[in-house]
Image (cartoon, rainbow, N blue to C red):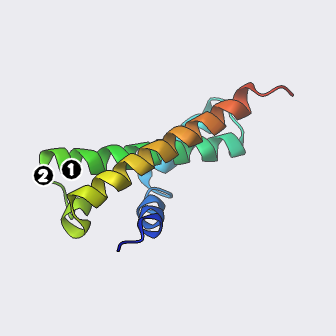
Amino acid sequence: IMDYHALVTQVAKKGAGSFWYDLARSAWVQSGGSDTQSELFAEAYSLGALAASILDDIQDQDGLNPLWQSVGVSPAINIGVGLAFKAINHFRKSRDLIFSPV
């Protein structure tokens, strides 16, 4: 039995500190967002990009050391969808920070 939570956490950590994470965070700060908002936005963006990459690799049956080859297609789909929902949740949190009353 595979520990999906640990695997999703491990895969998600690859997104933090990546080029896409840093780019999204910088773009948010440059547009006037706060540090807290920029971290949530960057996490959401990088998690979404990672989810899309995992699901794309499964669809195309390709990728460089793709997750689906090491854990199987079904677990990789679950992880990709889980990361997508995690990204959506982070986007919602960053939106709530922007539009919350002061």
- Who's the residue at 57% across and 36% down the image? 91
Residue positioned most to the bottom: 1
Task: Please give the residue where the numbered disc 2 appears in the rendered image.
Answer: 61
Above or below for 100 versus 35: above
Amino acid, disc 1: Asp
- Who's the residue at 35% across and 50% down the image? 80
Q: Work out how far the residue at label 2 is from the one at label 1, CA to CA, in angstroms.
A: 5 Å
Q: Which mark is residue 69?
A: none
Amino acid, disc 2: Gln
| Res 26 quadrant in image | top right
Q: In the picture provided, is 28 more to the left or to the right than 35?
A: left
Q: In the picture provided, is 94 more to the left or to the right than 58?
A: right
Q: Which structural element holds mark 1?
A: helix
Work out whether residue 23 can be spotted: no
Q: Which structural element holds mark 2?
A: loop
Q: Position of residue 94 (x, y in %)?
A: 64, 36
Above or below for 102 versus 22: above
Above or below for 11 versus 90: below
- Mark 1: give few (<14), some (14-19) or many (20+) Cα within 10 Å: many
- Mark 2: give few (<14), some (14-19) or many (20+) Cα within 10 Å: few
Task: Please give the residue where the numbered disc 1 appears in the rendered image.
Answer: 57
- Who's the residue at 87% across and 28% down the image? 102
Circle 2/circle 1 CB separation < 8 Å: yes
Q: Position of residue 99 (x, y in %)?
A: 73, 25
Q: In the picture provided, is 99 more to the left or to the right than 7?
A: right
- Who's the residue at 13% across and 45% down the image? 60
97 vs 71, nearest the viewer: 71
